[in-house]
Image (tube, rainbow, N blue to C red):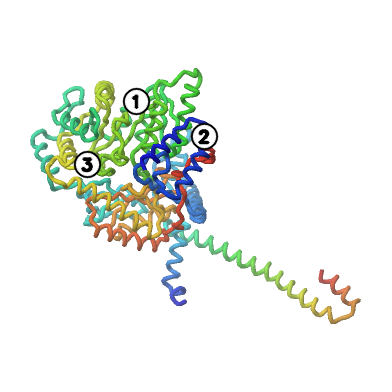
Amino acid sequence: MDVKNSPRYLYWLFCQFELITCSYLMEPWEKVLFYSFNLAMLGLLLYTTYVCVAFQASSAFQFTCARVSIENKTPKNVKIQSLLFS
Amino acid sequence: NKTINFYFVFLCSNPGPHHCSGICAFLVKALFSFWFINHIIHNGGLYKRPFNEAFEETPMLVAVLTYVGYGVLTLFGYLRDFMRQWKIEKCQNATEREEQKDFVPLYQDFENFYNRNLYMRIRDSWNRPICSVPGAKVDMMERVSHDYNWTFTYTGRVIKDIINMGSYNYLGFAQKTGPCQEAAAKVLSQYGAGVCSTRQEMGNLDKHEELEKLVARFLGVESAMAYGMGFATNSMNIPALVGKGCLILSDELNHASLVLGARLSGATIRIFKHNNMQSLEKLLKDAIVHGQPRTRRPWKKILILVEGIYSMEGSIVRLPEVIALKKKYKSYLYLDEAHSIGALGPSGRGVVDYFGLNPEDVDVMMGTFTKSFGAAGGYIGGKKELIDYLRTYSHSAAYATSMSPPVVEQIITSVKCIMGEDGTTIGRARVQQLAENTRYFRRRLKEMGFIIYGNEDSPVVPLMLYMPAKIGAFGREMLKRNIGVVVVGFPATPIIESRARFCLSAAHTKEMLDTALKEINEVGDLLQLKYSRRRLVPLLDRPFDETTYEETED
């Protein structure tokens, strides 16, 4: 696995990215513009993933926990609690 | 084999409705295909040798990524154009003058946009100046650009002994030593370099007569005529042969000279799909049945324009089928053997020799001396009446300066060498060496996993690159490793199908080819060019059944 993660392999991957998106042909200031745009988009994507998916995951987790604990309680409480979490 | 061939010729020439005879033929062929070699079965036994042509389909991911690359470059192109218009950046390309800015814009179409923003970035792979004879190895002048390919400066250094995989030097006659060069030097001291006249005035030398007789004998035709420029041979002689009221059926991928000649003639032009005989037959049938568009009169002449080898695809024309169609529908055939003369066939006499056909079946045999003979110019061969007519009525004969004497002598010597009339077997050996080199090179490249287009026997080898950045990268990386290649992109090819085109030569030794293959392998790994999924794509050369016809209908 060391071969895969070595700097040489990562550099080669970066070269492939450059060739596919044609940033190999761009002048340096164009490259800066392009990479900063890409990184900004990537950052936005990660942040959105963190906010939305994390929220959904945590609410789903709480729901399943509540469901498990409901089964140990009275029917009346079950109704109220299930209404609250729906 | 002969009886089976006869049987299939009979079956396939059956003029019944296509689907009936197609199904019967298919069933019988399917039966026999279990027992016999495939190539004898297909097309009624017209082919005496296997016809292996393949064009592997573009992988979907590669096509999508190519479009992504072009999209990014287009966006940046718009940005740069915006900056140039608002004077944020200095404008270095051609624009209209200030006074003309309110007129209709001159440089706004896609070709100019492409030129400014995409071609300029990779321009250093083209127009490279060479400073030696373009043989198997060539010297190149080194040049650098400090403003991203808008201007170039020479460093003064000469890069020596670059393996030349780009010159059309199929039989290796581009030499500065040897019998051809000595004969040409002798004629230069006798006749000088200039002719100073046209063929019809005072420019008809005895050397030209000698050359034309020799070319006619070489091709196996009655008579031939030679011109000073290959492009002009096509563009100036097709208008002399056809005119208004005639029909030209031209292949999709014909060379610019044929297209120009066809357009200049004023005849109606219809295009059939590349090397697709069903498409050609459909057009011929429609032409005979419906005649001219408005008046319904029969066409005066129907001329089919095809090339021997198509240099961008590396494909060879299906000549036996074209000749069979031509005879069936009583039309004429114009065969442009620019790349195939000298390069194909057991004795180097072109695509007619390669298929073992009769040269008299081709009405107009045209070719050039640029590729396999190491000279310049073109010829047309055919019946005596045709050539005599062209001597009088061709624009090229009437207005163009005739061929220069040393060039004529180079052609005479090289043709004699190929025919074996100079007493040696050098010509024959070169033709065989080229065939060997072709087979070896193509096989090795396919094994490595590249997508290679074209016929197995064609010395033109296109290697697919697809992505625009890889066009520039491939050219530069190969030059770093001392190999000169020609890369081609839009507009010579469709926009996503850019390629690198190797032209093999009899002058390449096996060591040179091995070196080149090693470097190509390295660059292929570096740039991830090995796209082939190694699946055999079914060719059109399969039994003609009912579905084949529908495929070609527009």
Residue closest to the eye, B401 or B107? B401
Q: Check disc 2: other Cα within 10 Å, few if <14, some if 14-19, many if 20+.
A: some
Q: CA distance from mark 3 to mark 1?
A: 27 Å
In the rendered image, residue B80, in percent from the top left (x then y), is placed at 47, 50
- Image quarter of residue B217: top left
Query: In the image, is B524 to the left or to the right of B171?
Result: right
Above-or-below relation of B391 to B59: above
Identity of the residue drawn at 85% across and 74% down? A81
Residue closest to the eye, B491 or B78? B491
Q: Quadrant of the N terminus of chain B?
A: top left
Q: Check disc 3: other Cα within 10 Å, few if <14, some if 14-19, many if 20+.
A: many
In the rendered image, residue B529, in percent from the top left (x then y), is placed at 41, 58
In the rendered image, residue B74, in percent from the top left (x then y), is placed at 49, 49
Q: Chain of mark 3?
A: B
Above-or-below relation of B399 to B431: above
Marking on residue A38 = none
Pick whichever of labels 2 and 1 is earlier in the sequence: 2
Residue assigned mark 2: B18
Residue assigned mark 3: B373
Query: In the image, is B215 to the left or to the right of B76?
Result: left
Query: In the image, is B326 to the left or to the right of A69?
Result: left
Query: In the image, is B160 to the left or to the right of B78?
Result: left
Query: What is the three-letter code of the residue carrying label 2?
Result: His
Marking on residue B239 = 1
